[in-house]
Amino acid sequence: MKALHFGAGNIGRGFIGQILVNSGFHLIFADINKNIVNAINLHHEYDIEILGNNSHYEKITGIEAVHIKDPKIFSVIAESDVITISVGVNVVSSLALLIAKGIEHKIHLKKNNILNIIACENCFRCSSILKKYVMNALPSKYHEYLENNIGFVDTVVDRIVSFNNTKKCNILFVRVEKFQELICDINQFKGDIPKIIGMKLTKNLNSYSERKLFTLNTGHAITAYIGLLYGHSHIYDAILDKNIYNIVHGAMNESGNVLISRYGFDKVKHNNYIKSIISRFKNFFLVDSLMRVGRNPLRKLCKNDRLVQPLLGTLEYQYPNINLIKGIAAALCYKNVNDSEAVKLNYLIQSKGVKYVLLKFSNLDPKLSVTLLINKYFNEFNKKFILNK
């Protein structure tokens, strides 16, 4: 079995590439970074450090790479049984034309193998979104072939990567936590389901997608935004601060109440899931900066993302939400001159105000009580943490 993975970054090498190779696939990475492509083709292997109290190394071998602009990428697409993707949610759509041309090439070569495409991005049903882009790029005469032979499989992926590479001389080395989760929609595969180690199959992917978004992503973001206000620099030290922990844990409980009501999750099991995520945040081997986690605040403040969507759920079920409100207020305080969204956010708040930002990006009515509370805590945070610095 042959697999092509777009994106030889930390998640590509430290998660998806690892499980594909361990599952027996012949793996080819595709990337825009010439240095990474050349390094893979020179060594045909790389090391992963699995972080924790019993840290250990794992060598991933027998791999190749192709530059994304190399014409032979179309032959690689045509011959692949599985294509996985981890390039970043904002880049996925740019692969549509490339994949469409690869599918055309596959048809012309009369390759009869089924192809399943799995976009492993932090985005709700990203593979389905990609399918629409590919369909638009593919001539209509090939649409029936695509529907019969190409699966676009939505997934939920979860693994935290350390951004402290202690082996700076080796650009392929990557450090990751032990925990990993790959959950796929069983109904979207074409042909035989590929055997991938650790892959879980479900008929109800939406529940797992919201569980991750409302718990891991919500908790991660709020830890970053509140942590920065309290002067911390990394996730693991911020979550140990009781002031921050109380807000983060409270927000995860608030979003959890929504999940329990919406999907019938077992309350005890979900509380244990929350505890497991917080314990992952406390892993001091995972060096993850709060500034990095807080990036792209405008996207994270959108109504369908990790901060506002769970808040809307609490309004739907009339549940408490004070900690989610504080988390959103802290996100509005995020400052990072190297992040274009943060710069834009700061400018809009100064020129238009918090209520304008919440209406434009979060679709929150300025007259809503939660909007007024977010504005109240934003002002309090500015007075307490920022003006006094």
Image: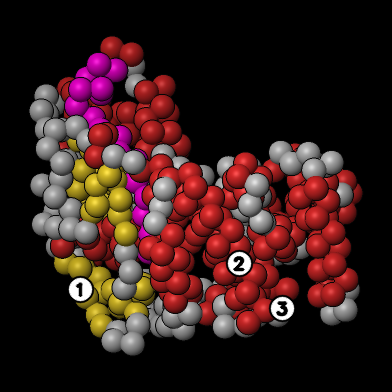
Which residue corresponds to the image point at 48% horizontal and 73% vertical from the top-left? 278
Q: Label 2 vs label 3: CA separation?
A: 17 Å
The tag earlier along the polypeptide, 2 or 3, is 3
Which residue corresponds to the image point at 48% horizontal and 44% vertical from the top-left? 262
Q: Label 3 vs label 1: CA separation?
A: 39 Å
- Mark 2 falls on what kind of element? helix
In the picture, the quarter occupied by the C terminus is bottom right
Task: Between label 2 and label 1, give the one nearer the viewer.
Answer: 2
In this orientation, does residue 302 appear?
A: no
- The amino acid on which the numbered mark 3 sits, given as a three-letter code, is Tyr
Residue behind mark 3: 230
Q: Give x and y (percent) for residue 41.
A: 23, 61
- Mark 1 falls on what kind of element? strand
The tag earlier along the polypeptide, 3 or 1, is 1
User: Do callouts 2 and 1 mark residues in contact (Cβ within 8 Å)?
Assistant: no
User: Do callouts 3 and 1 mark residues in contact (Cβ within 8 Å)?
Assistant: no
Left or right: residue 206 compared with residue 203: right
Q: Quadrant of residue 92?
A: top left
Q: Label 2 vs label 1: CA separation?
A: 40 Å
Which residue corresponds to the image point at 87% horizontal and 54% vertical from the top-left? 350
Residue behind mark 2: 250
Residue behind mark 1: 59
Q: Give x and y (percent) for residue 257.
A: 53, 55
Magenta extent = 143-163
- The amino acid on which the numbered mark 1 sits, given as a three-letter code, is Lys
Task: Between label 2 and label 3, give the one nearer the viewer.
Answer: 2
- The amino acid on which the numbered mark 2 sits, given as a three-letter code, is Gly
In this orientation, does residue 113 appear?
A: yes
Q: Is residue 382 above or below residue 152?
A: below
The tag earlier along the polypeptide, 2 or 1, is 1
